[in-house]
Image: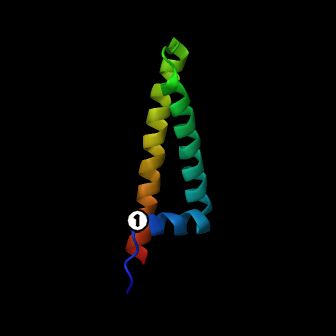
Amino acid sequence: MIKLSEEQIKEILYNENHEFKQLKDKHASFETRLQELLKKSRLSNEEELELHDIKKQKLILKDKMYQMIREYKQQN
């Protein structure tokens, strides 16, 4: 049996699992927005709230993706 790396599993899931692809794409869009906010020298109150919300949402998505990776490892 060949043991796949985490990156290989992510690639497989991204290509074969619609839900994983959506989670990863959403995570990437949050990361893009997060970087935009972090480049600013000052944030408005709304942007501060958005920044904290994005960080929480990214963690939630990451947790879901890693749960899917763990399930994939257990099944294969």
Disc 1: which residue = 6
In the rendered image, residue 43, in percent from the top left (x then y), is placed at 50, 15
Q: Residue at x 39, y 64 (%)?
A: 70
Locate residue 29: give its quadrant: top right
In the rendered image, residue 33, in percent from the top left (x then y), is placed at 57, 33
Quadrant occupied by the C terminus:
bottom left
Q: Is residue 63 above or below residue 40?
A: below
Furthest residue in direction bottom, as rendered: 1
Q: Amino acid at mark 1?
A: Glu
Left or right placement of residue 28 versus residue 1 in this view: right
Quadrant occupied by the N terminus:
bottom left
Q: Is residue 10 above or below residue 47?
A: below
Of residues 52 and 4, the one nearer the viewer is 4
**Tag 1 secondary structure:** helix
Of residues 60 and 11, the one nearer the viewer is 11
In the rendered image, residue 9, in percent from the top left (x then y), is placed at 46, 68
**Numbered marks: total:** 1
Coloured how?
rainbow
Q: Residue at x 44, y 35 (%)?
A: 56
In the rendered image, residue 8, in percent from the top left (x then y), is placed at 46, 69
Local crowd at mark 1 within 10 Å, few (<14), some, or many (≥20)? few
